[in-house]
């Protein structure tokens, strides 16, 4: 850029650093620790603990669909009835980059698909959100769903997909 007197005007640079909100920073740090843990470690207990910490006293689960199209929890801190959704919802969610918000009985639930690699269908993260944490919850559930997609082979090898008799054996 040239100034009006023909000289060269120097552009001013500015760098501003920000801190993430503490809840998000702690959740990301914990998520990285969980997925960095040895590839031979069972992801189930860590994931159960992570959901319990991040979404304390709220409904949250990682589920796959059973043969009848209902949520089959793999990791859950869900109490009460699990919502049933029409098949069309899951068809819509399978088109990449989609998520859903379910408004049910005064509560709002986020539903994010988790790609399962070579397996047919997807798994889903369902989390109850609150108005004061909704933006953060979207970010964290979205990130967790992507991390689970990348690490799905570990999920498959964990105790999460095994029946109780298989875990006991």
Image (spheres, rainbow, N blue to C red):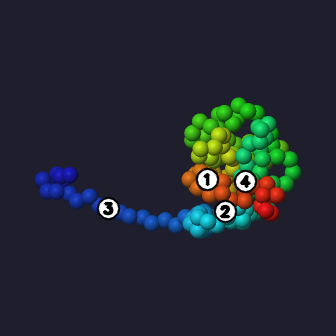
Q: Callout 1 environment at 10 Å: few (<14), some (14 to 19), or many (20+)?
A: many
Measure how far apart labels 3 and 1 are at the Cα level. 43 Å
Dot placed on the residue nearer the N-terminal end, 3 or 1: 3
Q: Is residue 60 visible?
A: no
Which image quadrant for residue 55? Answer: bottom right
Label 3 crowding class (10 Å Cα cut-off): few <14, some 14-19, many 20+? Answer: few
Select label 2 or label 3 by which is in front. 2
Residue visible at 62% across and 46% down?
Answer: 116
Marks 2/4: CA–CA distance: 11 Å
Question: Could you tell which of marks 2 and 4 lies nearer the N-terminus?
Answer: 2
Secondary structure beneath dot 3 equals: loop
Q: Earlier in the sequence, mark 3 or mark 4?
A: 3
* Above/below status of 84 relative to 79: above
Picture coordinates of residue 152 (x, y %)?
61, 53
* Numbered mark located on residue 43 in the image: 2
Say which mark, if any, is on residue 88.
none
Q: CA distance from mark 2 to mark 3?
A: 45 Å
Residue pictured at 66% horizontal, 54% vertical: 156
Is residue 27 among what the camera can see?
A: yes
SS at circle 4: helix
Q: Position of residue 65 (x, y in %)?
A: 74, 42
Horizontal and vertical percent for residue 56? 75, 63
Q: Which residue is tagged 3?
A: 13
- Discs 2/4, front: 4
Q: Secondary structure at mark 2?
A: helix
Q: Which residue is mark 1?
A: 152
Tag 1 or tag 2, which sits nearer the N-term?
A: 2
Q: Which mark is residue 161?
A: 4
């Amino acid at each position: 850029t040239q100034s009006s007197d023909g000289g060269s005007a120097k552009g001013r640079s500015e760098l501003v650093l920000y801190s993430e909100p503490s809840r998000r920073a702690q959740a990301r740090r914990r998520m990285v620790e969980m997925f960095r843990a040895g590839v031979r470690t069972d992801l189930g207990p860590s994931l159960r603990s992570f959901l319990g910490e991040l979404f304390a006293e709220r409904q949250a689960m990682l589920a796959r669909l059973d043969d009848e199209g209902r949520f089959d929890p793999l990791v859950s801190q869900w109490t009460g009835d699990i919502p049933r959704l029409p098949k069309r919802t899951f068809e819509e969610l399978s088109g990449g980059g989609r998520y859903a918000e379910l408004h049910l009985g005064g509560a709002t639930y986020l539903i994010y698909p988790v790609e399962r690699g070579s397996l047919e269908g997807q798994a889903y993260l369902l989390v109850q959100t609150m108005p004061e944490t909704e933006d953060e919850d979207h970010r964290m559930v979205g990130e967790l769903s992507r991390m689970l997609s990348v690490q799905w082979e570990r999920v498959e090898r964990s105790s999460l997909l095994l029946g109780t008799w298989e875990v006991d054996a």
